[in-house]
Amino acid sequence: MASGTKNKGINCIIVNSEVEEIDIETNRKLEAQMEINLSTENMLNKLSSIYVGWEVLTKLVKPLEYNNTRGGKQILLKTNAVTYVVRK
């Protein structure tokens, strides 16, 4: 993305970190159905190392929770939504 961005161009990335899935009926933690599930700190460190020298316009972490159905079971999905906006 960095090499494809024009000078003064902006990248906006919104990604989930620290995803947790909890079976609502049993309150048991389930394995999160995500390809990569990084800690918020690790995610922010990776983003800042990738965008060295870029101007950070927004760096926001917002905890989210919502109900979902997975395999016929009601689950509570918890995550930190990371918004990272930078200008080259």
Image: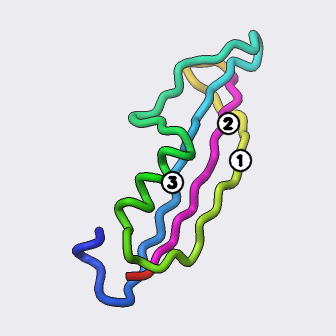
Coordinates of residue 29 in the picture (x, y in percent): 65, 17
Q: Quadrant of residue 18?
A: top right
- Which mark is on residue 44? 3
Which kind of residue does numbered mark 3 sit on?
Answer: Leu
Quarter of the picture containing the C terminus is: bottom left
For mark 1, give the secondary structure.
Answer: strand
Which kind of residue does numbered mark 1 sit on?
Answer: Pro
Is 25 left or right of 18, judged from the image as shown?
right
- For residue 43, above or below residue 59: above
**Disc 3 versus disc 1: nearer the observer:** 3
State which tag comes first along the sequence, 3 or 2. 3
Q: Quadrant of residue 82?
A: bottom right
Cα separation, mark 3 vs mark 2, equals 18 Å
The reply to whether the C-beta atoms of the residues labelled 3 and 2 are less than 8 Å apart is no
Does the segment drawn in magenta span residue 8? no
The residue shown at (58%, 35%) is: 19
- The residue wearing badge 2 is 78
Packing grade of label 2 (10 A; few <14, some 14-19, many >=20) is: some
Q: Residue furthest left?
A: 3
Is 10 left or right of 32, judged from the image as shown?
left
The residue shown at (35%, 62%) is: 50
The reply to whether the C-beta atoms of the residues labelled 2 and 1 are less than 8 Å apart is yes
The residue shown at (52%, 65%) is: 84
- The residue wearing badge 1 is 63
Is 25 left or right of 82, judged from the image as shown?
right
Span colored in magenta: 74-86
State which tag comes first along the sequence, 3 or 1. 3
Cα separation, mark 3 vs mark 1, equals 15 Å
